[in-house]
């Protein structure tokens, strides 16, 4: 079975997103080998509340955050809400080539300044 992807449902309804989120949480729980009862206990939430979340009948942000914390996925929130002050370097071949050109140009300028300084001192 292929893992359901959020990219496959872009532009669809809130209900479809909630359903997919529930499916992904259920898949994660099963891959870790937990029953619903054990997983709910690990999260510190009542079993009934967790079952409702997994069925897509709960809008609880708290449960979702508890799942992210338990599965050590809170770092993924930085992808959802990136720091606007952070400078992101593009990792494409053209961007790498541009960085190489900039580095070479800076070295060439430094070399030219060195040569100019050396010729003035001689």
Image: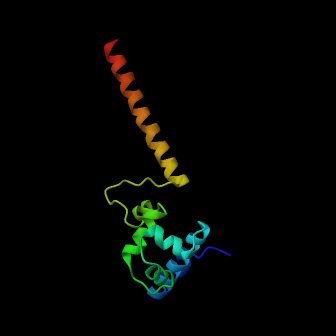
Q: Can residue 6 be seen in this view?
A: yes
Q: Where is residue 22 in the image (x, y as percent from the top left)?
A: 51, 79
The quadrant the N terminus occupies is bottom right
Toward the viewer: 102 or 34?
34
Toward the viewer: 63 or 108?
63
Outermost residue on the right side: it is 1
Q: Where is residue 23 in the image (x, y as percent from the top left)?
A: 55, 79
The vertical placement of 12 against 33, above or below, is below
The vertical placement of 25 against 59, above or below, is above
Q: Residue at x 37, y 66 (%)?
A: 81
Q: Position of residue 60 (x, y in %)?
A: 38, 79
Outermost residue on the top side: it is 122
Q: Can residue 13 be seen in this view?
A: no
Q: Quadrant of residue 36?
A: bottom right
- How many numbered circles does the render carry? 0
Toward the viewer: 26 or 97?
26
Q: Position of residue 83 (x, y in %)?
A: 34, 59
Q: Which residue is drawn at 46% across and 84% down?
A: 52
The quadrant the C terminus occupies is top left
Please give left or right for residue 98 compared with residue 5 in the image.
left
The vertical placement of 71 against 27, above or below, is above
Q: In which quarter of the image is residue 30?
A: bottom right
Q: Which residue is drawn at 47% across and 79% down?
A: 47
Toward the viewer: 96 or 110?
96
Q: Which colour scheme is used?
A: rainbow
Q: Residue at x 39, y 33 (%)?
A: 109
């Amino acid at each position: 079975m292929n893992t359901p992807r959020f990219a496959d449902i872009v532009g669809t309804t809130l209900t479809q997103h909630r359903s997919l989120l529930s499916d992904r949480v259920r898949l994660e729980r099963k891959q870790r080998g937990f029953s619903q009862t054990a997983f709910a206990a690990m999260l510190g939430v009542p079993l009934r509340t967790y079952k409702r979340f997994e069925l897509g009948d709960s809008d609880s942000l708290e449960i979702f955050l508890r799942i992210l914390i338990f599965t050590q996925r809170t770092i993924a929130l930085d992808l959802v809400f990136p720091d606007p002050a952070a400078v992101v370097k593009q990792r494409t071949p053209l961007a790498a080539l541009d960085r190489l050109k900039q580095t070479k140009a800076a070295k060439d300028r430094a070399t030219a300044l060195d040569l100019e300084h050396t010729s003035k001192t001689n």
